Image (cartoon, rainbow, N blue to C red):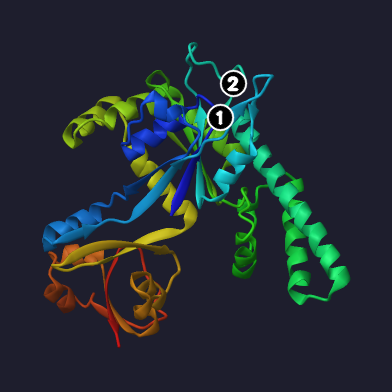
Amino acid sequence: MQIGIVGLPYCGKSTLFQTITKTHLDPTALAKTEAHHAVVKVPDARLDKLAALFNPRNTVHATIEFVDVVGLKKGETGSTQFTTNFLSNVKTNDALVHVVRLFQNETVPHPDGSIDAVRDVTTFETEFILSDLALLETRVERIKKQLQKQNDDLLKRELPLLDKCKMALEKETPLREIEFTKDELHTLKTYQLLTIKPMLIALNFDESQRGEVDRVIQRIAQTKKGKHTSVVSFFGKIELEMSELAEDEMTMFMEEYGIKESALTTLIREAYALLGLQSFFTVGEDECRAWTIKKGMNAQEAAGAIHSDFFAKFIRSEVVHYDHFIEAGGSFAKVKESGHWRLEGKEYIVQDGDITSIRHS
């Protein structure tokens, strides 16, 4: 999974990227026009607990790739220009984090001259809508010309879908908030539309604004929050300092500033929710591992996430939920005695936190 971090100049997106990836970039690296990439482990206290019980040779966390998306430029009037390069870089991501500036800093002025979170969010949304509209209009015209030459059932089915998207965008509704069938989503995936990507709005405050956070989040959420749009906050400057500390020092630092969880934990939790993801586990003396799958996947599909042969040759899945396993003291024997160890067929819907072992031919 790849998550792109976007934002207007001087909003703190590179600060957030460095904080969550612990890749501290010098000014020379930050000035380059290439995007910055880093893969991070998904924190999961359940996997850590399982690893402590089994003491395996390997512990494998799920991972997420974060991208500091570059390409925005200041135009002649001082306002931000959304370049073709920037929009192309955005398209390759599964979800987006839009960093929005709330902090004041006279030495680093906002490109639009003032701090206005709603305006900044709307600026991005408008540019993405216009980009999607231009793409869809071009595609619709091309389909209509092709249908004049040949009777193609696939193109005939595609046209109403594209018209549905255009109607939503013309009403300034991002496609992420529109309901689509699985088949429709499969068709739209080839277009890499920007407004269909889940969006996490990350409000960047400084420590002097701690009393304003809840009020501002509520104000933004009233106009922008949706099924696939969420709003969170972080304190860019102090969280970057925190990321350089040892684990115990960071805990003390967070307590001192009243920070309940790190920016990384917040982003991953919200990203999983927006993308409809969850984790299940495989355990043993060789390896304890977290696997990321879509919510609603059945046991056979989850087995396929481990190995394609497991999908093709699936027989049964042995399952116990993490909570029941821990309640039983981490003992498979006690779990079986309690009746929480089960054999499930391929249609069983895997739950977040399931511990499973796949039987296959």
Residue at x 21%, y 78% (from the top left corner)? 339
Quadrant of the image occupied by residue 30: top left
Q: Is disc 1 surrounded by few (<14), some (14 to 19) or many (20+) residues within 10 Å? A: many
Q: Point out residue 294 in the picture as x, y percentages from the top left corner.
A: 44, 64
Q: Nearer the viewer, residue 228 or 23?
A: 23
Q: Is residue 286 left or right of residue 237?
A: left
Label 2, on which residue?
Answer: 111
Q: Nearer the viewer, residue 171 or 243?
A: 243
Label 1, on which residue?
Answer: 8
Q: Nearer the viewer, residue 59 or 279?
A: 59
Q: Is residue 100 above or below residue 180?
A: above
Closer to the chain start, of discs 1 and 2, is 1
- Would residue 234 be visible to someone looking at this image? no
Q: In this figure, what is the number of numbered marks?
A: 2
Q: For mark 2, give the secondary structure.
A: loop
Q: For mark 1, give the secondary structure.
A: loop
Q: Point out residue 342 in the picture as x, y percentages from the top left corner.
A: 26, 79
Quadrant occupied by the C terminus? bottom left
Q: Is residue 256 above or below residue 306?
A: above
Tell me whether circle 1 and circle 2 mark residues in contact (CB < 8 Å): yes
Give the CA separation, mark 1 to mark 2: 8 Å
Residue at x 46%, y 47% (from the top left corner)? 3
Q: Is disc 2 surrounded by few (<14), some (14 to 19) or many (20+) residues within 10 Å? A: some
